[in-house]
Image (cartoon, grey):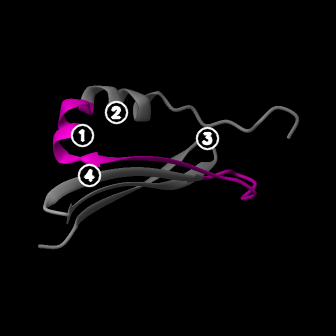
Amino acid sequence: AGADLQTERIARDGFRGIHQFATYPSGGRTNTTEVLSVLAPAQDRVYVLVVRCTDRCFDDNSGTINAIFDSLTFKEPRGQ
């Protein structure tokens, strides 16, 4: 069996990017990877957050993982 990949485009406060969620077999287990990749408005910076663990780990910690992704704020660094 291959990977299951879901991709969502995001745009917020001038930032744009993708939020991907993938499950895939590896070493007899099913792993899950969640990735948020965001390009700054000036297109001079890319911000990436990656969470990867087994499906069980992901399920056991889904509340915390979701809270982290939901709490992210996009803004340019001061002085830019």
Q: Nearer the viewer, residue 10 or 33?
A: 33
Q: Which residue is mark 3?
A: 13
- Mark 1 Cα-neighbour bin, 10 Å: few <14, some 14–19, many ≥20: some
Other-residue count near label 3 (Cα within 10 Å), few / some / many at <14 / 14–19 / ≥20: few
Q: Which mark is residue 65?
A: 2
Residue range in magenta is 39-62
Task: Provide the residue designation for mark 1.
Answer: 58
Give the x, y percent position of residue 8. Answer: 37, 55
Q: To which quarter of the image does residue 31 belong?
A: bottom left
- Give the image quarter of residue 56: top left
Residue occupied by mark 4: 32
Counting residues from the N terminus, which is met first, the one under dot 2 or under dot 4? 4
Residue for point 46% across, 27% down? 71
Which one is earlier in the sequence, the residue at label 3 or at label 2? 3
Q: Position of residue 68 (x, y in %)?
A: 42, 30
Q: What residue type is disc 1 on? A: Phe
Residue drawn at x 67%, y 51% as measured from the top left: 40
